[in-house]
Image (cartoon, rainbow, N blue to C red):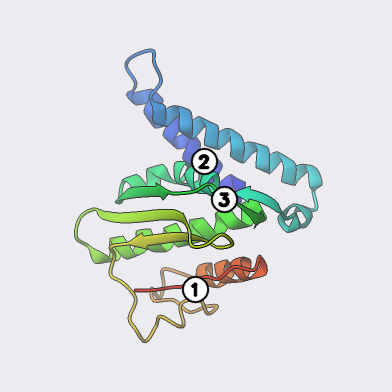
Amino acid sequence: QPLTYLSPSLGIIRKRLEQTESAAPHPTTLRALAAAQEAAAHLGEIVRRIGARDALDEVGPVDLGELVLSTLIMVEEELGSRADVVREILCRPLVSGNRTRLCQVLLNLLTNAVLAVQDRGEGRGVILVRVAPVSEEMIVLAVRDDGIGIAPADRDRVTDAHFTTRPGRGSGLGLALSRGIVDSYGGSLYVDT
């Protein structure tokens, strides 16, 4: 999955550098460059292991707040053209998991949010990404959007494999895979509308 981040991040760098008339780089450019470098480092680790499966199965502490911030930088170009993103990082917990897999969960949630905003068809939307404590032992990572929502009849099915509310535009695997990843680390994935 690191290749997914590398291209958009480098695209941001290129675009910002083309727009910059002064010698000082734009702050977004520096963040995008850092995200590209981080993605390249992850890719290098996976390639070195060549049995990429080993890297994806490696579990350790992941700073959830940092994961959210770096993932949002990686997809800033995509999100920024369609929605305003509100970040609420109320804590920086370490959670047990695999960084690449947790990043994939967040990317899947953000993709669904962007599509929901697009389907609404009324200008720019708003996507809220929030990390907050629920208790001493529980953290919530929430992705909310002001898109079209999910029909009540579909709510319990959206995490089923191959179920999609967008026939022809989605495989119906993103939320199913995300639920599997989150479940494997002892978490829960909830969908509300």
- Counting from the top left corner in percent of width and height, residue 105 is at 54, 60
Name the residue tied to disc 3.
Answer: 93
Label 2 crowd (10 A; few <14 / some 14-19 / many >=20): some
- Counting from the top left corner in percent of width and height, residue 92 is at 53, 47
**Separation of disc 3 and disc 1 at Cα?**
30 Å
- Counting from the top left corner in percent of width and height, residue 90 is at 44, 49
Tell me the kind of residue under disc 1. Gly
Marker disc for residue 136: none
Name the residue tied to disc 2.
Answer: 7
Tell me the kind of residue under disc 3. Pro
Please name whichever residue, 17 or 55, is drawn nearer the observer in this view of the structure.
55
Residue 106, compared with residue 71, is above or below; it is: below
Residue displayed at 36% across by 62% down: 144
Tell me the kind of residue under disc 2. Ser
Question: Which quarter shows the C terminus?
Answer: bottom left
Name the residue tied to disc 1.
Answer: 172
Give the mark count. 3
Of the residues tagged 3 and 1, which is closer to the observer?
3
**Separation of disc 3 and disc 2 at Cα?**
28 Å
Residue displayed at 38% across by 12% down: 23
Residue 66 sits in quarter:
top right
Label 1 crowd (10 A; few <14 / some 14-19 / many >=20): some
Of the residues tagged 3 and 2, which is closer to the observer?
3
Residue 109, compared with residue 91, is above or below; it is: below
Residue displayed at 71% across by 39% down: 44
Q: Earlier in the sequence, mark 2 or mark 1?
A: 2
Q: Earlier in the sequence, mark 3 or mark 1?
A: 3
